[in-house]
């Protein structure tokens, strides 16, 4: 009945969960004046390596393939993409909190390499070991008319990796957070440095706290450090949902 009161224990638990989620959202989205710029956030400088621990070389990345690594935390996945053509800095973008920023474009010898958080900005879908609803699509599909986009099949949000992860379709309220990359020309090595745009890590940890704890234990919020292994999404994930 609408007027019945919840049992005291249940009410306390719901209030505690509500306050926890509010605190996580507040930490992830600090109150800033409308139009304030979103500054880059720098984390540990982490070298990208292959599954054998060898340094990844920019000129060896195949174009239009889904590559995945974890940064800036051990459980937060990112896409690493070679778009096959130079990618220039794009026009200014905005986060869901109306903070504007300018994406810096691609890196590497051809400036064709980009990276983004693989956590969808709508419902926080992300690639797991079992399944992935989100991936890069080089060709249009039944549910998307855009080619060369990152498409989340959960609610059909689509992002353009050649334009800073800009939303081109679907309900996502902001671009994907970009991962800042450094290319060292002398060695052709790649490093992850930080993020740019609307981070969703606090919301991610709050939503998937139980699942992450079961899978990773105390490592769920461990910061990436030293190296980050890069693998093909098809090798990392058992099933990719196509749409």
Image (spheres, rainbow, N blue to C red):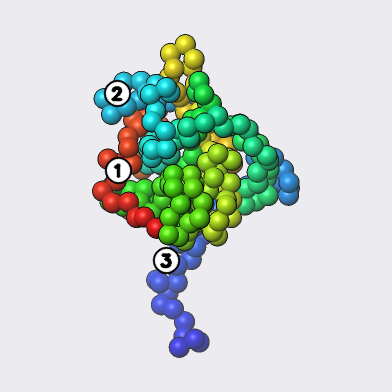
The mark that comes first in sequence, 3 or 1, is: 3
As displayed, is residue 208 above or below residue 63?
Answer: below
Residue mark closest to the camera, 3 vs 1: 1
- As helix, strand or loop, the secondary structure at mark 2 comes to loop
Q: Where does residue 203 sit, x and y in percent of width and height?
A: 49, 51
For the point 36% across and 20% down, the residue is 55
Residue placed most toward the observer, 134 or 14:
134
As displayed, is residue 16 above or below residue 204?
Answer: below
- Please report contact status of discs 2 and 3: CB closer than 8 Å, yes or no: no
Report the quarter where the N terminus lies.
bottom left
As measured in the structure, the alpha-carbon distance from the residue carrying label 2 to the one carrying label 1 is 19 Å
> Is residue 70 at least partly visible in the picture?
no
- Decide if residue 182 is on the left or right side of residue 63: right
Mark 1 Cα-neighbour bin, 10 Å: few <14, some 14–19, many ≥20: some
- As helix, strand or loop, the secondary structure at mark 1 comes to helix
- Please report contact status of discs 3 and 1: CB closer than 8 Å, yes or no: no
- Decide if residue 66 is on the left or right side of residue 237: right
Mark 2 Cα-neighbour bin, 10 Å: few <14, some 14–19, many ≥20: few
Report the quarter where the C terminus lies.
bottom left
Residue mark closest to the camera, 2 vs 1: 1
Residue placed most toward the observer, 84 or 134:
84
- Judging by the rendered image, the residue that carries numbered circle 2 is 53
Residue mark closest to the camera, 2 vs 3: 2
Q: Quadrant of residue 65?
A: top left
């Amino acid at each position: 009945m609408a007027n019945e009161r919840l049992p005291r224990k249940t009410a306390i638990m719901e209030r505690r969960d509500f306050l926890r989620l509010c605190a996580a959202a507040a930490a992830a989205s600090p109150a800033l004046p409308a139009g304030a710029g979103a500054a880059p956030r720098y984390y540990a400088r982490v070298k990208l390596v292959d599954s054998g621990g060898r340094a990844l070389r920019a000129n060896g990345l195949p174009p239009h393939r889904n590559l995945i690594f974890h940064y800036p935390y051990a459980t937060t996945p990112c896409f690493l993409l070679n778009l096959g053509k130079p990618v220039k800095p794009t026009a200014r973008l905005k986060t869901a909190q109306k903070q504007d920023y300018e994406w810096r474009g691609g890196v590497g010898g051809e400036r064709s390499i980009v990276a983004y958080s693989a956590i969808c900005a709508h419902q926080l879908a992300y690639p797991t070991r079992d399944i992935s609803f989100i991936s890069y699509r080089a060709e249009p599909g039944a549910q998307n008319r855009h080619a060369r986009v990152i498409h989340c099949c959960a609610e059909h949000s689509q992002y353009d990796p050649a334009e800073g992860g800009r939303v081109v379709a679907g309900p996502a309220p902001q671009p994907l957070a970009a991962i800042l990359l450094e290319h060292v020309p002398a060695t052709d090595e790649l490093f992850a440095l930080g993020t740019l745009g609307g981070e969703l890590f606090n919301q991610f940890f709050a939503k998937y706290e139980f699942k992450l704890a079961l899978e990773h234990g105390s490592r769920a919020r461990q910061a990436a450090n030293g190296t980050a292994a890069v693998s093909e999404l098809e090798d990392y994930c058992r099933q990719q949902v196509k749409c």
